[in-house]
Image (tube, rainbow, N blue to C red):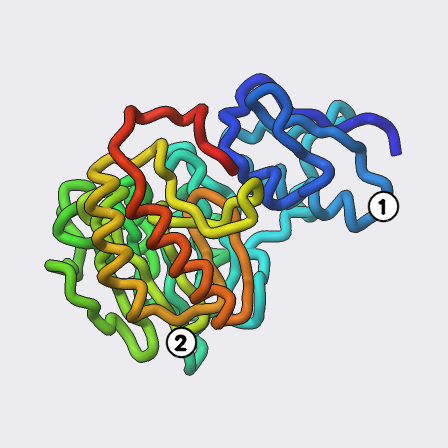
Amino acid sequence: MPDTWYVDDRCTNCDVARQLAPGLVEEVGGRSEVVRQPRDATDLALLNAAAFACHTRSIRRTDGPLDSAADPFPLALDENVLLCGHNSHHTAAANSYLLRRPGGTLMMVDTPRWSDELASRYQSLGPVTDVLLTHRDHAAHGRRYADRFGARLWIHEGDLAAAPDADRVLRGTESVEVAAGVVAHPLPGHTEGSVLYVADERYCFSGDSFSWSRSRNALAVAEHVTWYSIEELAASLARTAPLLRFAWVLPGHGDRRHLAPERMAEQLTALVAHTGRLRPQPIDFTATEW
């Protein structure tokens, strides 16, 4: 295929395109670059996914605009979780998800960019009963999606200023079942009101509390971008880790990963130990190790 794909100069090095098109889009000089052109339909599908997720629409083609028919979102990660795509610059390009529930309903975890067309597309999959916000940085568009869906909007009191009209407010540090099989675990640290949502002891929607690091091949916290307290995050993880069982880590920023629950538990134990050794440091986005 001709060399038609490239990344324009609006790239913010958010890693989303590299998650979706590994080997085709890589980090070069502190930003994403298309390092190989697509060779077949599979490669082309990966690049289209990266392009339609990119919050700055920086994944471009020299031979014309993107083909809307090639938009794969919402994209199934397994039978119960879909990646929303269409990341928003109002959430610093955070990933968001749809979680299927028994009876054909769905829950949205964090939010993609807002548009009527996207809301209709997500809603066509089934009634969305709840919009679960993991923390303040990802609250943009939450109220609009909740109102469109007729859904409940959830946030923790520590980050309530970001969604003061939320319908349900989580309080304190006690774990709470917000729906059958879905448990909210308050995890102050990245922000004061950060929350993990764990569904069916299989899916952990971790917000920005932790993610999978490809460079470390391990669970990792965003130690260089912790807005509230790294010590509080360490204490939260130590308190909460014994309560957690999951196979998928599904973060807002950072990569996703599926492992056997026993292996994920080992990763979580190592993460608790590592985070306990960390000390406060200045915010530095450029130091993030994806």
- At 31% from the left and 26% from the top, the residue drawn is 283
Please say if the residues under marks 2 and 1 sit with CB atoms less than 8 Å apart: no
- Amino acid type at circle 2 is Asp
Query: Looking at the rendered structure, which numbered label has been put on residue 224?
Result: none
- At 14% from the left and 41% from the top, the residue drawn is 161
Where is residue 3? Give x, y as percent: 82, 26
Q: Which quadrant would residue 98 be assigned to in this image?
A: bottom left
- Sequence-wise, the earlier of marks 2 and 1 is 1
Q: Residue at label 1?
A: 40
- At 21% from the left and 49% from the top, the residue drawn is 188
In this view of the protein, which residue sits in the foreground, 133 or 63?
133
Relative to 175, is 60 on the left or the right? right
Image position of 5 with respect to 73: above or below: above
Where is residue 199? Give x, y as percent: 38, 71
- The answer to whether residue 163 shows anywhere in this view is no
- Amino acid type at circle 1 is Asp
Where is residue 73? Give x, y as percent: 57, 52
Q: Residue furthest right?
A: 1
Q: Residue at label 2?
A: 200
